[in-house]
Amino acid sequence: MKITLRELTEDTVKEIFDTLIVNQDPVVIIYIDCEGGDPLLAFGLYSALTLSGKFIVTYAVSKVYSAAMIIFLAGHIRCAHEYSHFLIHEVSFEEDEARTMQAREYKRHAEELARDSNALFALIAKKSDIKVGTIRKKLKNAPDSDWTFYGEEAKTLKIADSLDVLPRDERDYLQFLKK
């Protein structure tokens, strides 16, 4: 089964959930070119993928930004191209300009953002050779609070496993894994 992730929206996540349930293929290949989205949707999709019992391959075709990193990390094999572009930053949200919030609501949002950022950084640390402290230091020193890098660095950091071209047919992955 092949999936292309270009947007991380409720509709996209629902469509992938439904496909995971219906499709009986043992291998799921997810091609990612996504600028991110809601981290809670991404964590939900990550859970669905990792609990599906299927072998997950994620491929960074181009952009793996923000919450799309969560989906990329769901792969049993994570592949990137040398020109794949990754972006890590603290979790944020866009607020409607016309809406007024009280101080306690701002505080609650700040606590939720900190919790979600901690969860994102912990997942990255668990699935790579990067420590949470290193992520925080990189973000603190970045001029725009975004840490960006290409495929080769993703491989060095063990975010990506490979820069190789993998088999195109799902059945071939089972043979690929035996090598």
Image (tube, grey):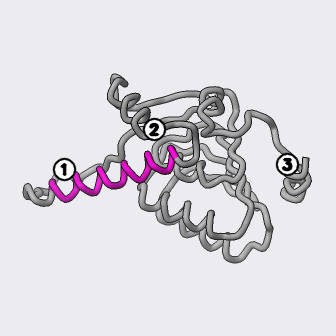
Q: Nearer the viewer, mark 3 or mark 1?
A: 3
Which kind of residue does numbered mark 1 sit on? Glu
Q: Nearer the viewer, residue 107 or 100?
A: 107
Q: Secondary structure under badge 2?
A: strand
112 up-or-down from 31: above or below:
below
Q: Which residue is mark 3?
A: 168
**Residue at image point 11% right, 56% down:** 100
Spatial CA span between label 2 and label 1? 25 Å
24 with respect to 12 (left or right): right
Which kind of residue does numbered mark 3 sit on? Arg
Based on the picture, tell me whether residue 113 belongs to the magenta stretch.
yes
Q: Secondary structure under badge 1?
A: loop
Q: Main secondary structure of the magenta part?
A: helix
Spatial CA span between label 2 and label 3? 29 Å
Q: Residues within 10 Å of mark 2 (few under 14, many from 20)?
A: many
* Residue 97 - label: 1
Q: Residues within 10 Å of mark 3 (few under 14, many from 20)?
A: few
Q: Position of residue 150 (x, y in %)?
A: 59, 28
**Residue at image point 23% right, 55% down:** 111
Spatial CA span between label 3 and label 1? 46 Å
List the single residue furthest toward the bottom: 22
Q: Nearer the viewer, residue 44 or 12?
A: 44
**Mark 2 or mark 3, earlier in chain:** 2
Q: Nearer the viewer, mark 2 or mark 3?
A: 2
Which kind of residue does numbered mark 2 sit on? Ile
The range drawn in magenta is 106-125
Q: Nearer the viewer, residue 35 or 137?
A: 137
**Mark 3 or mark 1, earlier in chain:** 1
**Residue at image point 78% right, 73% down:** 24
Q: Which residue is mark 2?
A: 88
**Residue at image point 28% right, 57% down:** 112
